[in-house]
Image (cartoon, rainbow, N blue to C red):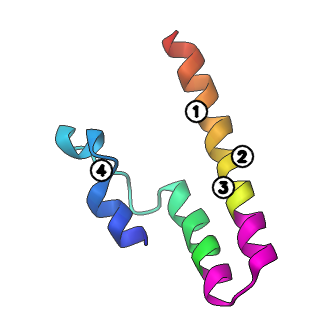
Amino acid sequence: LNAVRRTVVWGRLRSEGARPPADHHSFADHERIVEAIAERDLGGAAAAMRLHLQQVERRLIPVREAAE
């Protein structure tokens, strides 16, 4: 999953030539989600996804507010 995300890099970033660092914060989140799914841990996968989305929201809201 992370290899795919690194390759795609959200289209916009890819077209600009930018790449997230190999230790980008979301990659660890994605690994936790995938591991929970692989272990068939539905509750763990849901919790990991919820935490990931909360972290993304916390990071994006200040960026969005600064742009407005």
Cα distance, mark 2 to mark 3? 5 Å
- Residue at position x 28%, y 38% in the image: 12
Residue placed under numbered mark 1 in the picture: 60
Mark 2 Cα shell of 10 Å, populated few (<14), some (14-19), many (≥20): few
Tell me if residue 44 comes above or below residue 68 in the rendering.
below
Stretch of the chain drawn in magenta? 35-48
Residue that numbered label 3 is attached to: 52
Q: Which residue is mark 4?
A: 19
Q: Residue furthest top?
A: 68
Q: Amino acid at mark 4?
A: Arg
- Measured as percent of width and height from the top left, residue 17 is found at 19, 44
**Is the C-beta separation of discs 2 and 3 under 8 Å?**
yes
Q: Nearer the viewer, mark 2 or mark 4?
A: 2
In 3D space, how far apart are the residues under numbered discs 1 and 4 (Cα atoms)? 18 Å
Q: Is residue 46 left or right of residue 35?
A: right
Q: Amino acid at mark 2?
A: Gln
Residue 54: percent from left, percent from top: 71, 46
Q: Earlier in the sequence, mark 1 or mark 4?
A: 4
6 w.r.t. 40: above or below: above
Where does the image place residue 67, in percent across and percent down from the top left?
49, 14
Above or below, comparing residue 51 to residue 11 in the picture: below
Q: Which mark is residue 37?
A: none
The residue depicted at 78 percent of the width and 65 percent of the height is 47
The single residue placed furthest to the right in the displayed view is 43
Q: Quadrant of the N terminus?
A: bottom left
The answer to if 15 sits in the magenta stretch is: no
**Residue for badge 2:** 54
Q: Earlier in the sequence, mark 3 or mark 4?
A: 4
- For mark 4, give the secondary structure: loop
CA separation, marks 3 and 4? Answer: 20 Å
Q: Nearer the viewer, residue 59 or 11?
A: 11
